[in-house]
Structures are given as structure tokens and as C-alpha cells.
Amino acid sequence: STGSAQTNPEKNDVEYLTPVSIGTPGQVLNLDLDTGSSDLWVFSSLTTSSQVNGQTLYDPTKSTTANQLQGYTWQISYGDGSSSSGDVYTDTVTVGGVTFSAQAVQVAKTVSSEFTSDPANHGLLGMGFGSINTVEPVAQKTFFDNIMPDLDLPLFTADLKRSAPGRYNFGYIDPSAYKGEITYVPVDNDSGFWAWTSPAYAIGSRNFGNTTLKGIADTGASLFLLPSAAVSEYYGAVFGAKYDRSQGAFTVPCDASAPDFTFVVGDHGATITVPGNYIKYAPIDDAGKTCFGGIQLDTGIGFSIFGDVALKSAFVVFNGGNRTIGWATK
Ligand SMILES: CN(C)c1ccc(C(=O)NN)cc1
């Protein structure tokens, strides 16, 4: 089988939401497909009502194919401090025309304010590795794990775009979606993430250094989080850039000329370039004078995060069959 689903950016591309049908008859929720986590959880009829704010709710009692996993629970927290928790059902789930009939659907009973505050986000569909699924007493498989054996090819691709709809494809590679060759590199999934290492990076027209970037490809993260050496070098090249302690982040003048950030993929010279404009991420003031930086520090995480700012500059193949990640320009 193969499948294809359009994904739609929220304001400032903070996340990309994809329609997912759950249950019989289908209840369509817009979910954040997230390669940085491995729980499929949804706002539901069981979610504490004071924590619901316009989201579409999955109601298992309205689905003839829903079955509760009695006594199973889950609790997840994300890098930004947000969290959610609840109970577990199985039900039929369809994404981009690909269906798995007994998918674990984690229904939220509680969600943190970051989730409550966004009516457009109805939950997450994790596409990381199963080892980090939070369901107790038995971890559940991700949607991708479940459909992989039926896919023509054991992979999915992410084609995110800046402030425009993008696409997740399942089981096939669309040759019209990228230019040149796809360069594949090994993934170390011991952490449960799509972790890989870039051998070097360059800022603007400067020469490549020899500092590697060890990071994860995370479609659920908005920004490009890098080590302080890379971040300082980058913003050192942007006139007027500064670290704003009140924001806890680097900002740049929205009218500054910002250099590209290029990272190497593999050892045959392939590279991906993040346009400087993507790093003038979003205005933080009404005048549109100061912009939030799309590159920020990865301090405290232990690895870098190739989030949407980096991913939307490429066509990315997540191959679960041989555990590689492929990068191509587009
Ligand atoms: C609050 N929301 C919508 C989040 C969505 C995704 C993530 C995340 O770290 N994914 N890898 C965090 C928070």
C-alpha cells in the first residue's frame, strides 16, 4: 500500500497539522505528525472540560470499532515543558488513505495549557520509534510501525514548506518532490528518535568547519536547535542580532540580511541549505521590527534538533526498514 496526506502549517509554521480519521464512522481530527515522539494521543470526550478550548474531540463511545485497553494509561511530557495524559483505546486509524484497524489511540484526560491554548491542534501522531511510547503497562506501536509491513516500501517522507501546505507520503518516494539525489545516512534509534550526525556546517559563504552536528529529525519541533558554537557564529554574522534575555532567545532585526546555514549530509559532499530568510522566523513585535531567530541553542538537551526550520528546506525520507534518513534539496 501507499498513502499521501497534505499537511498544513499553523501561523509562523510553529507546527504542521494533518487530517487523521479515527473510528467508525470516521471522526476526523487534525494531528501534529511528530517524528520526535511515539504516542498517538487525541483530545477526547474524556478530556477535562476546563482544558478543552474548541478542539475537535474523539469520542470512543461514538465509534463502533473502539475497544478500551482496560487499565492501560499514558503520560507524556515534551521538550517545551508541555504534557498530557489519559487512557488507551484501539480503533481504526486512517492517514492519507492508509488504514490500520487496531491502532492504539491514547485519549487525553488531561492536557497542559500549551495544548489547551491551540484550538487547531487536536493531538499528536508520533512517528518516532516504539521504545519511547509512554503507555503502561505495555508500550504500544506507532501508526508507522503498524503499517510498515503493508507499505510498498518501509518508509515515509516529509515535505514541509515555509508557510505553505506540505505533504507526508507513506510507502513511496515521489521523484517530482525533490531535485538531484537523495543522500541516505544511518540512524541511531537507541534514543527512540531519528538520530543522525552531520559531519560539518557552514554559515553563508564561509568554508565548512569540521564540527559535527549530532541531532534528531523532529517534525514536531518548530525550530533548528544547535550547539552554542554554531549559534554564536551564526548570529555573529547578522548585524543587529542579539540574545534577548527576556525572551531567552536570539532575535534579529526583521530587515537584516541573514546568511544561509548549510549542513553536510554523508561523506560525498551532499549539503542542505537553510535559507537565511527561514531564520528570520517570526516578528515578535507589532511593528515587525524584531524577529525571533529560527536557530536557537540546544543547551541541556544533549543533541541538536533538526526541527521544521531545517526540515522545510529539504525533502526527507524516514526509512524504518534499514533505519536510515535521506535528505535531498527541492
Ligand atoms: C505543545 N505542542 C503542540 C507540542 C508539540 C510537539 C512537541 C514536540 O516536542 N515534538 N517533538 C512539543 C509540544
Image: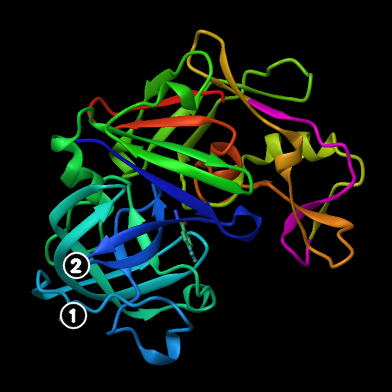
Is 261 within the magenta? yes
Left or right, 278 with respect to 137, comes to right
Residue sitting at x 51%, y 53%: 8
**Picture colour scheme:** rainbow
Residue pictured at 54% horizontal, 30% vertical: 314
Q: Are marks 2 and 1 in contact (CB under 8 Å)?
A: yes
Residue 286 in the image, given as x and y percentages of width and height: 85, 68
Is the CB of mark 1 within 8 Å of ligand 1? no
Q: Residue 298: tell me if it is visible.
A: no
> From the viewer's perspective, is residue 268 above or below residue 312?
above
First in sequence: mark 2 or mark 1? 2
Q: Position of residue 94 (x, y in %)?
A: 24, 54
Q: Secondary structure at mark 1?
A: helix
- Look at the image and give the residue range highlighted in magenta: 245-262
Q: Which residue is mark 2?
A: 23
Separation of residues labelled 2 and 1 (CA atoms):
8 Å
Instruction: Tell whether 112 sits left or right of 48.
Output: right
Asked whether residue 279 appears in the rendered view, the answer is yes
Up the image or down, 266 lies above or below 105; here it is: above
Q: Which residue, given by chain and number where applicable, does mark 1 sit on?
A: 62
Q: In the orientation shown, which residue stands out farthest toward the front?
A: 25
- Which amino acid, by three-letter code, is at mark 2? Gly
- Above or below residue 64? Residue 140 is above
Please indicate whether residue 300 sits to the left or right of residue 260 in the image.
left
In this view, the residue in front, 107 or 214, is: 107
